[in-house]
Image (cartoon, grey):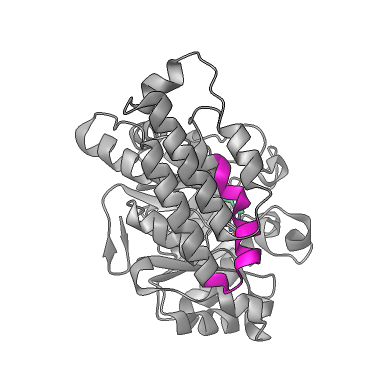
């Protein structure tokens, strides 16, 4: 897949996710093999009004490249101005959010609202392509609802105005995150355009990544929720694509070490230990998934508001696991039926 000067074979991408895909998480995912990462969506209004929260989201560390900055908005001149502001952070490309389903975004004629008015989506894309010297991409859904799937027409029109790639969350707006993503649309879009097509939606495992490439002919796969607290999925997927063999699950020690490293990065990034430790709670379920009796440990972690108690509890948990299970691979622990009191 080529986007500007990037050339990535079977790319595995980290999805933009508000309050998740921040700089610390992007760095962790890049370390584990995400080929491209995206910022959380950034309000075009916020960027043109110099809102500190929007500018904070533009901060990118060198090791995050290749990276896309994603912006959203309903007003084309504001989007153009915001795109120029976003250039300050020197991303590899710029992405337009045309898929966000939440009410307050749609009410501003932004995100998935653009699916109700494809000519406006295309006009916005054209304006950005003409305004910035970087490649511009679009991330969208199949259509507004299941009776108005427009993705093939939209893809053709976006290609005509110079979009460099198209990421498709294979649901309609009315589905939100419910129901199943219908990947078959990606194959249909591939038939009508020659720009790279990125498949997104319900990619939950390395095996799903392999199946997505095989079944749809997509150029890249984008992973969202399955990467939360599980950056290992990028390494696992790459290994499976390269060798055809699944990797062993990450060990408990590795999960715990990466979890703590991630928390340290977030504290440094926020500059506020309490806020960062509270914000970090959404990652515990992912990092501890598949570990024996993790729910009890997670409950304890949720009460902490600073780093040291988290570190102390997780290191004690690692020791408890070592005493109980030694160096058994997680696959075997998962299948054991015993009670384990941490
Ligand atoms: C917490 C959360 C925040 C999200 N924020 C964004 C966003 O800022 N921009 C965007 O384009 N999509 C956003 N999404 C949608 C994801 O990028 C992705 O399209 C969706 O989760 C489907 O992929 P998945 O099944 O791999 O999670 C968000 C999703 C979640 C769960």
Would you say residue 170 is visible in this rendering?
A: no
Residue sitting at x 43%, y 31%: 321
Looking at the picture, tell me which residue is in the foreground, 23 or 150: 23
Q: 3 left or right of 118?
A: left
Residue sitting at x 67%, y 78%: 46
Magenta segment, principal secondary structure? helix
Image quadrant assignment for residue 270: bottom right
Q: Position of residue 169 (x, y in %)?
A: 55, 46
Q: 39 left or right of 164?
A: right
Q: Where is residue 165 in the image (x, y as percent from the top left)?
A: 42, 59
Of the 4 image quadrants, the one containing the N terminus is: bottom left
Q: Give the range drawn in magenta.
A: 269-285
Q: Where is residue 338 in the image (x, y as percent from the top left)?
A: 51, 15
Image quadrant assignment for residue 75: bottom right
Q: Position of residue 105 (x, y in %)?
A: 73, 62
**Residue 112, placed above or below residue 314:** below
């Amino acid at each position: 897949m080529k986007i500007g000067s990037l050339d990535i074979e079977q790319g595995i991408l980290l999805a933009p996710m508000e309050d998740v895909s921040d700089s610390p998480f992007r760095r962790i995912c890049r370390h584990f093999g995400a080929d491209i990462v995206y910022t959380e969506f950034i309000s075009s209004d916020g960027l043109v009004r110099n809102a500190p929260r929007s500018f904070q989201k533009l901060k990118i560390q060198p090791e995050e490249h290749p990276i896309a900055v994603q912006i959203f908005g309903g007003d084309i001149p504001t989007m153009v101005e915001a795109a120029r502001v976003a250039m300050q952070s020197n991303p590899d490309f710029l992405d337009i959010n045309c898929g966000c389903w939440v009410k307050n975004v749609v009410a501003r004629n932004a995100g998935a609202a653009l699916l109700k008015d494809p000519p406006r989506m295309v006009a916005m894309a054209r304006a950005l392509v003409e305004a910035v010297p970087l490649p511009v991409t679009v991330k969208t859904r199949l259509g507004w609802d299941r009776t108005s799937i427009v993705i093939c027409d939209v893809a053709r029109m976006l290609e005509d105005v110079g979009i460099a790639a198209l990421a498709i969350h294979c649901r309609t707006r009315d589905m939100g995150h419910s129901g199943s993503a219908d990947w078959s649309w990606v194959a249909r879009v591939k038939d009508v355009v020659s720009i790279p097509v990125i498949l997104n939606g319900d990619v939950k495992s390395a095996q799903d990544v392999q199946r997505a490439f095989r079944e749809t002919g997509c150029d890249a796969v984008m992973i969202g929720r399955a990467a939360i607290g599980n950056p290992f999925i990028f390494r696992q997927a790459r290994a499976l694509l390269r060798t055809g063999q699944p990797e062993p699950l990450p060990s408990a020690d590795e999960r715990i070490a990466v979890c703590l490293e991630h928390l340290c990065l977030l504290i440094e990034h926020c500059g506020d230990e309490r806020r960062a430790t509270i914000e970090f709670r959404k990652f515990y379920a992912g990092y501890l998934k598949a570990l024996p009796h993790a729910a009890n440990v997670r409950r304890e972690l949720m009460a902490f508001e600073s780093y040291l108690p988290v570190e102390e509890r997780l290191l004690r948990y690692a020791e408890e696991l070592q005493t109980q299970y030694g160096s058994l691979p997680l696959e075997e622990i998962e299948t054991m039926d015993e009670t384990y009191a941490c």
